[in-house]
Amino acid sequence: MEMDRNYPKKAGNNGFHFYLPFHPENDRSLVGNQAPGVFETLERVHEGKVADFAFSTTEYFSPEEMLEMLAEYDLDVIWMPLYMGEMQNFTEWGWSGSGNSITLAQEWGLSGARQMEDDFMSGSLIHLLDLQSIEESKIAMLDNMEKMLGENKRLAEQLLVTNHLQDRYDYLQNEGFQVYGAVVTGPVKELLKLQEVNGLHSFQLGEMIDWNWNNDEF
C-alpha cells in the first residue's frame, strides 16, 4: 500500500478537492463550487497541450460506472475520491464548505492497483485505473489495508494520519466502493468535452504540459 506516498491515496498532494453529493448525516443533496474561467482557459490553450483535470459528481458511482461514463473520451483516469463513511460512522479532521456544500478535510481515494512492501513505505504500480483492471485495483486496496491492520495498525494509522483505518476498511467491505469524482489527464480538446456530461460539476484545472507526440498514450 502506498502511503500518502500514496495508497490509499489522499487528494491533498494533487491540489484538487471534491464535493460530497449528499450530506452524510441526513442524505440531503449538496452542490459544489465552480472556479471561474476553467473552460475558458482550456479554450485558449493550444490543443497540443495535455492537462490534469478534476471534477465532482452529483451522485455516488461505483468505480466501474465512472470508468464507463468516461470510456468514450481519450483520457486516463488517475484517481477517484472514495466515500468511506466519514461524518456518518466516524468524524475525522472535519470538513469545509457552506450549508449546501461539503469538502472533506482528508480525502481518500482509489488509484491503480499497487502492491505494498513490508516496510509500508514503498510499492510497485501494477495497473492504472481502467475497466480491464479496476477489480484488481479494488482487491489490492482492500488486501493492503487488511495487511496494515493485521501487521502494524498503529504504525499504519500514524503514517496515514488517521485513527479510523479499521472503520474505513469495514465501510468498503460492507458498503462497497463509492466514488464521487475523478482526476483525469488528457488532451485539452478531450477535457473540453466533459462540460457537456450530465452529473459532472466543480471542474478544476491542474498542471498543463506539452503533448509528447512520440508517446502513444493518448
Image (spheres, rainbow, N blue to C red):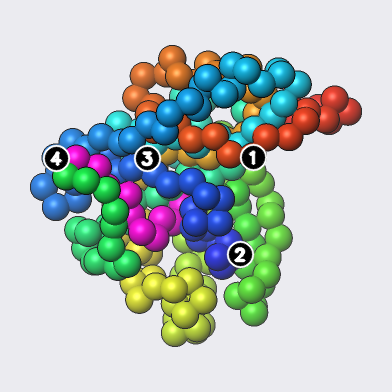
Asked which secondary structure carries label 2, the reply is: loop
Give the residue at mark 2: 5
Q: Sequence order check: which comes first, mark 4 or mark 2?
A: 2
Q: Sequence order check: which comes first, mark 4 or mark 1?
A: 4
Asked which secondary structure carries label 1, the reply is: strand
Assess whether mark 1 and mark 4 are in contact (beta carbons under 8 angstroms).
Answer: no
190 sits to left or right of 16: right
Give the residue at mark 1: 207
Assess disc 4: are there few (<14), some (14-19) or many (≥20) residues with their C-alpha within 10 Å of its C-alpha.
few
Instruction: Tell me what residue is drawn at x 28 percent, y 63 percent.
Output: 94
Give the residue at mark 3: 180
Distance between the alpha carbons at the discs numbered 4 and 2: 34 Å
User: Callout 3, which amino acid?
Assistant: Tyr
Magenta segment's dominant SS is strand
- Residue 28's disc is 4
Distance between the alpha carbons at the discs numbered 3 and 4: 15 Å
Distance between the alpha carbons at the discs numbered 2 and 3: 22 Å
Assess whether mark 2 and mark 4 are in contact (beta carbons under 8 angstroms).
Answer: no
User: Callout 4, which amino acid?
Assistant: Arg
Assess whether mark 4 and mark 3 are in contact (beta carbons under 8 angstroms).
Answer: no
Q: Decide which of 31, 109 is in the foreground and name it.
A: 31
Q: Quadrant of residue 61?
A: top left
Q: Sequence order check: which comes first, mark 2 or mark 3?
A: 2
Distance between the alpha carbons at the discs numbered 1 and 2: 19 Å
